[in-house]
Amino acid sequence: MSWFVRKEKGINTPTEMKREVPDGLWYKCPECKKVTPAREHKLNAYTCPYCNYHDKIGSEIYFEILFDEGEFKELNPDMRSADPLGFVDTKAYPDRINATIQKTGLKDAVRTATGKVNGREMVIACMDFGFIGGSMGSVVGEKIARAIDHSIKKKLPFLMISRSGGARMMEAGLSLMQMAKTSAKLALLSEAGVPYISLLTDPTTGGVTASYAMLGDFNISEPGALIGFAGPRVIRETIGKDLPKGFQKAEFVLEHGFLDFIVDRKELKSKITSLLDMIQ
Ligand SMILES: [Zn+2]
């Protein structure tokens, strides 16, 4: 029968168009439950092709997505947390830090780097939720402060990508001081006339929301991100009322005037470039 006969001879797919997907590598979307080949999910900047759910990613992938050819120079890569309070919960704090470094390959919950984004040199600080819930301790505060210093010195735009559960309880008051320190540095950045874009990703809460994450010249967010200070349960119990639908989601926060716009991760790089083109 004619439809069994190959009309054109040979295989016509150019080699570069072929996608080799190793067996067993699939991504299942936690939102719509649909399955995508892992490779396609990666090409889609780790967003679901069906429902656009933005998967939670860390500094390694953000740097790869944003910096041209994935090339950058990390600032203060070896800074590690001390234990000034001798804090012990279920584990001693230094043991927890060591175990997390072993597990994640990261030194703390933020990485800061400089490199080119569409040809423009800039400084990017990106938090890693995998490191004790992206908690802000003295290393996070200090690395961000030094990254801002670098931005001021070299007059380079600063992008902060936040993902955090808030302050690091193992550092108690020292952790809270990072809010003041980073805010003061951002005031100097503003005085120097260097632009600051803050990108809030899922979730950005606690002391991070209450300091640098909300101090951008532009505060932008990924779709569907949870953004708040205290969690919904705490607020519900405090005010004794049910919360509105979509409370603390990026779209709700935008509608109430706390965000400038929501950006799809696939357009993040081009949006940042056009934003900086407009103001510089
Ligand atoms: Zn989905």
Image (cartoon, rainbow, N blue to C red):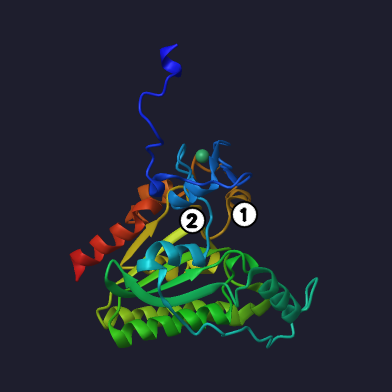
Q: Earlier in the sequence, mark 2 or mark 1?
A: 2
177 on left or right of 218: right
The residue under the point 59% across, 44% down is: 26
Q: CA distance from mark 2 to mark 1?
A: 14 Å
Which numbered tag is attached to residue 227? 2
The N terminus is located in which quarter? top left
Q: Position of residue 188 (x, y in %)?
A: 33, 83
Q: Amino acid at mark 1?
A: Val
Foreground disc of the pair 2, 1: 2
Q: Position of residue 84 (x, y in %)?
A: 68, 88
What SS does tag 2 mark? loop
102 on left or right of 228: right
Which numbered tag is attached to residue 234? 1
The residue under the point 37% across, 37% down is: 12
Residue 122 vertical placement versus 275 (above, below):
below
198 on left or right of 107: left
Is the CB atom of the residue marked by disc 1 within 8 angstroms of ligand 1's nearest atom?
no
Nearer to the camera, 201 or 277: 277
The C terminus is located in which quarter? bottom left
Toward the right, the furthest residue is 90
What SS does tag 1 mark? helix
Residue 122 vertical placement versus 51 (above, below):
below
Nearer to the camera, 58 or 86: 58
Q: Quadrant of residue 212?
A: bottom left
Q: Position of residue 246 (x, y in %)?
A: 49, 42
Toward the front, the furthest residue is 9
| Label 1 neighbour load within 10 Å: few <14, some 14-19, many 20+ | few
